[in-house]
């Protein structure tokens, strides 16, 4: 009787499918999840680039910054590169605001970034202005280097959370920088 059962191959395909199916399912969801993660990383990077472009083409979020970034008694028309300290100053603005930062302009920049990647919050965005020595005394505002950073973003797994116990992975910090322009909005 046992020899008959050993030779009977009916149902062997079902056993093979039962072994392979979870592996194929996990691989399929893994490809989808990591594809989604990379897609969200690309969106975060594009949002950062969009944010820095908005920051350089609209009014400065940092307020009260003198012509060359530092107070000077040089005559109007003097190039900033000749003013001491025009390349070493910096000002940082975050969602906490504080003195010297325009909260309304900051929120407008965050809204521009959210139009590309809605998961961004104001707490994730940092804007830094720093001196380049560009511009001239009497211009009314400096021509800074503008850096927009997107920080502390995470990707939360959807399908693999239940299958493999993966919760979330931190995204890298995203940074984009451009030199300021002589445009105002």
Image (cartoon, grey):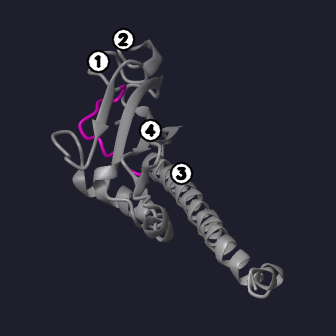
The CA distance from mark 4 to mark 1 is: 25 Å
- Is 120 or 178 nearer to us in this picture? 120
Up the image or down, 50 lies above or below 127; here it is: below
Tag 1 near tag 3, CB within 8 Å: no
The numbered dot on residue 119 is none
- Mark 4, residue position: 147
- Is 71 or 63 nearer to us in this picture? 63
Tag 4 near tag 1, CB within 8 Å: no
- Mark 2, residue position: 84
Q: Which residue is located at x 29 percent, y 18 percent? A: 72
Which contiguous range is marked in magenta?
A: 58-68
- Secondary structure of the residue carrying numbered label 2: loop
- Mark 3, residue position: 45
Which numbered mark, 2 or 4, is in the foreground of this view? 4
- Mark 1, residue position: 72
Name the main secondary structure of what is drawn in magenta: loop
Chain-order first, disc 2 or disc 4 = 2
Chain-order first, disc 1 or disc 3 = 3
- Secondary structure of the residue carrying numbered label 1: loop
The CA distance from mark 2 to mark 1 is: 8 Å
- Secondary structure of the residue carrying numbered label 3: helix
Q: Which residue is located at x 64 percent, y 65 percent? A: 27
């Amino acid at each position: 009787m046992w020899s008959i059962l050993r030779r009977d191959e009916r149902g062997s395909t079902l056993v093979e499918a039962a072994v392979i199916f979870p592996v194929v399912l996990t691989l399929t969801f893994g490809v989808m999840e990591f594809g989604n993660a990379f897609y969200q990383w690309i969106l975060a990077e594009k949002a950062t680039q969009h944010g820095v472009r908005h920051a350089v083409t609209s009014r400065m979020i940092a307020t009260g910054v003198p012509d060359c970034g530092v107070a000077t008694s040089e005559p109007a028309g003097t190039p900033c590169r000749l003013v001491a300290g025009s390349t070493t100053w910096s000002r940082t603005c975050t969602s906490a605001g504080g003195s010297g930062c325009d909260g309304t302009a900051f929120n407008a920049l965050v809204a521009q970034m959210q139009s590309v990647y809605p998961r961004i919050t104001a707490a994730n965005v940092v804007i830094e202005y720093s001196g380049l020595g560009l511009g001239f005394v009497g211009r009314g505002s400096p021509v800074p280097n503008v850096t927009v950073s997107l920080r502390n973003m995470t990707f939360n797994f959807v399908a693999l959370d239940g299958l493999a116990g993966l919760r979330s992975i931190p995204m890298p910090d995203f940074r984009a920088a451009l030199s300021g322009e002589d445009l105002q909005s």
